């Protein structure tokens, strides 16, 4: 962890997509990452779990799942693809 920086619990929406490479960076700085995913069994989600992230099933079409995932977090990072592109556009390069 970076000296003087408090550890945060970060809900990362979009962690299995293009910005997933930020997860190891957050973890290396001592933060706890809660990775939101529609499919916790996906290869990208499994890689995040192996890196040390905690996975939670979240679907933006189910606001209750998003609210539950964010309940005990200090910060939320939300990154994704324009809705018109659809879920397939979220498939980023392998982590």
Image (spheres, rainbow, N blue to C red):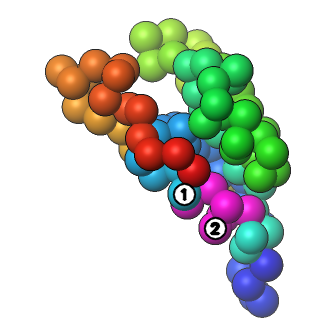
Q: Please give the residue where the numbered disc 1 appears in the rendered image.
A: 21
Describe residue 19's horizontal placement relative to residue 30 as left or right. left
The image quadrant of residue 82 is top left
Residue 18 versus residue 87 in the image, above or below: below
Task: Classify 32 as above or below 13.
Answer: below
Instruction: Check whether the beta carbons of the residues at disc 1 and disc 2 lie within 8 A of each other.
Output: yes
Please tell me whether mark 2 sits on a helix, a strand or a loop.
Answer: helix
Judge whether 26 appears above or below 50 on screen. Answer: below
Q: Position of residue 32 (x, y in %)?
A: 77, 54
Magenta-highlighted residues:
22-27
Closest to the observer, 66 or 22: 22
For label 1, the crowd category at 10 Å Cα-Cα, with few meaning under 14, some 14 to 19 and many 20 or more, is some
Which residue carries the number 2 mark? 25
**The N terminus is located in which quarter?**
bottom right
Marks 1/2: CA–CA distance: 7 Å
Determine whether, in the image, residue 79 is placed left or right of residue 22.
Answer: left
Residue 11, above or below 71: below
Tell me, yes or no, whether the highlighted magenta stretch contains residue 76: no
Which residue corresponds to the image point at 54% horizontal and 38% vertical from the top-left? 16
Q: Residue at x 74, y 84 (%)?
A: 2
Q: Position of residue 77 (x, y in %)?
A: 50, 49
Quadrant of residue 8 in the image? Answer: bottom right
Q: Residue at x 61, y 19 (%)?
A: 39
User: How many badges with numbers are in the image?
Assistant: 2
The answer to whether residue 76 is seen in the rendering is no
Q: Position of residue 44 (x, y in %)?
A: 61, 36
């Amino acid at each position: 962890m970076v000296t003087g920086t408090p550890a945060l619990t970060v809900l990362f929406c979009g962690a299995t997509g293009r910005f997933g490479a930020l997860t190891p960076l957050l973890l290396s700085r001592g933060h706890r990452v809660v990775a939101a995913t529609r499919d916790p069994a996906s290869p990208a989600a499994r890689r995040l779990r192996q890196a040390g992230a905690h996975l939670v099933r979240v679907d933006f079409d189910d606001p209750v799942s998003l609210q539950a995932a964010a309940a005990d977090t200090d910060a939320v990072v939300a990154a994704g693809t324009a809705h018109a592109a659809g879920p397939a556009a979220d498939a980023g390069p392998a982590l």
